[in-house]
Image: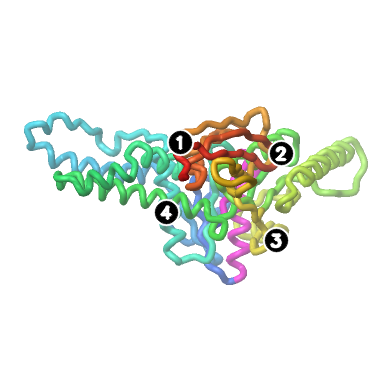
């Protein structure tokens, strides 16, 4: 699975569609899924809007996931269960709205959309699933939803408490625990799919200008923090080179020079994956003919076998000493994070790491759970947190 995300208006939907076509040309079946509620995929492919998975032609299937419709379907099931209580003496306490009244539940909609994509990816029908994500922060928030929600669910009702409830005297709690665990397992499977570098990678699409460069830096940091493996950065919309005279030609030449200078800066900043420049075309890339030409230009993106950052996100090692005098180090990969924005917090068996305005709960390795944080530093790429044993709980 490959996720296209980036700055709004940078052309990620177009590049996602062209990449899907390029892969399909090799004979491999492809599904392209839009999880952006502002769907533009049908327009780029020049096909009629529709529901569910449908063929877009040339070996490409598409789906524009309607997260609100998914929410209505799930909520309708809940409403059916609530209706059973209508004849009960306390049935009047259930006043659920009709499914069609829903205006959306932030977090839940995002989770349902990702779960639907994960279900399709696990079906085995397609060689590759291309995901057209929302723009910038909306994409990061959506992609972080499975981990965020599963972490909070597990914290609200920890596993040891669920086990106690399941083996207790009330058989109804056994059913509740089973349902809770089933939901948590489904969320965990979706989280694991999107965070597994062997199954999911991402292409960050930006514009070749100062604003795009700044956005690219933030998105690179955010992607690492939420566990998304980057395979490439694309600076899209570079003015093509041409010969000519006059004011317009001069303006375009200066514009191209500025864009190439930004591309060079991006290449010097992002060193762990390719930074690709994509030139603006002389026609709007809509429909198979135009997308086919674009697919030829970006053919390197159609074979991600050698493209990914290949960095382990969190690494724990014994640094020095033995027993209560030992020092352990946890390294967390956070490229391009703003040092001034970094925050750390400890909550039970988790370390809460913040960077560039977002946070992630990191489940500590077993050896670190019996330790306290001694110090932390950031070298521009890795956040290094050192731990020392807590004598009160360290085994003697």
Residue at left 13%, top 30%? Answer: 92
Local SS, label 3: helix
Q: Residues within 10 Å of mark 3 (few under 14, many from 20)?
A: some
Q: Which mark is residue 379?
A: 2
| Vertical placement of residue 122 versus 394, above or below | below
In x, y percent, where is residue 249? 87, 40
Q: Is residue 23 magenta?
A: yes
Q: Residues within 10 Å of mark 4 (few under 14, many from 20)?
A: some
Q: Which residue is mark 3?
A: 300
Q: Which residue is mark 1?
A: 392
> Taking the image as drawn, is residue 135 in sight?
no
Q: Which residue is mark 4?
A: 189
Residue at left 15%, top 47%? Answer: 171
Residue at left 23%, top 33%? Answer: 96
In x, y percent, where is residue 266? 76, 43
Q: Nearer the viewer, residue 12 or 323?
A: 323
- Mark 3 or mark 1, earlier in chain: 3
Q: Which residues are magenta?
A: 2-26
Mark closer to the observer (4, 1): 1
Residue at left 61%, top 68%? Answer: 25
Going by the image, does 295 lie left or right of 69? right
- Mark 3 or mark 2, earlier in chain: 3
Q: Are marks 3 and 4 in contact (CB under 8 Å)?
A: no
Mark closer to the observer (3, 1): 1
């Amino acid at each position: 699975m490959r996720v296209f995300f980036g700055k709004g208006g940078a052309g990620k939907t177009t590049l996602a569609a062209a990449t899907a076509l390029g892969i399909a040309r090799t004979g491999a079946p492809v599904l392209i899924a839009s999880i952006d509620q502002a769907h533009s995929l049908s327009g780029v492919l020049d096909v009629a809007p529709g529901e569910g998975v449908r063929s877009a032609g040339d070996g490409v299937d598409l789906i524009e996931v309607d997260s609100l419709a998914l929410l209505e379907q799930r909520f309708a099931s809940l409403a059916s269960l609530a209706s059973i209580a209508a004849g009960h003496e306390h049935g009047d306490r259930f006043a659920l709205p009709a499914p069609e009244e829903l205006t959306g539940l932030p977090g839940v909609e995002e989770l349902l959309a990702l779960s639907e994509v994960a279900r399709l990816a696990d079906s085995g029908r397609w060689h590759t699933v291309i995901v057209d994500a929302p723009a910038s922060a909306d994409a990061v928030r959506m992609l972080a939803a499975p981990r965020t929600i599963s972490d909070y669910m597990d914290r609200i009702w920890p596993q040891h408490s669920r086990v106690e409830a399941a083996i207790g005297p009330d058989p109804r709690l056994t059913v509740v625990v089973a349902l809770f665990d089933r939901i948590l397992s489904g969320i965990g499977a979706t989280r694991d799919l999107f965070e597994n570098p062997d199954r999911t990678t991402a292409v960050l699409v930006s514009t070749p200008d100062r604003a795009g460069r700044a956005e690219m830096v933030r998105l690179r940091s955010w992607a690492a923090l939420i566990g998304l493996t980057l395979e490439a950065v694309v600076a899209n919309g570079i003015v093509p080179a041409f010969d000519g005279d006059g004011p317009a030609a001069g303006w375009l030449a200066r514009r191209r020079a500025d864009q190439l200078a930004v591309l060079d800066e991006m290449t010097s900043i992002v060193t762990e994956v390719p930074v690709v420049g994509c030139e603006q075309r002389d026609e709007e890339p809509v429909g198979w003919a135009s997308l086919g030409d674009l697919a030829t230009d970006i053919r390197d993106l159609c074979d991600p076998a050698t493209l990914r950052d290949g960095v382990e996100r969190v690494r724990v090692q014994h640094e020095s000493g033995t027993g209560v005098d030992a020092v352990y180090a946890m390294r967390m990969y956070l490229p391009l994070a703003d040092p001034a924005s970094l925050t750390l917090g400890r909550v039970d068996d988790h370390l809460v790491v913040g960077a560039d305005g977002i946070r992630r709960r990191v489940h500590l390795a077993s050896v670190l759970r019996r330790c306290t944080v001694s110090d932390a530093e950031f070298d521009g790429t890795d956040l290094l947190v050192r731990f020392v044993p807590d004598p009160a709980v360290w085994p003697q």
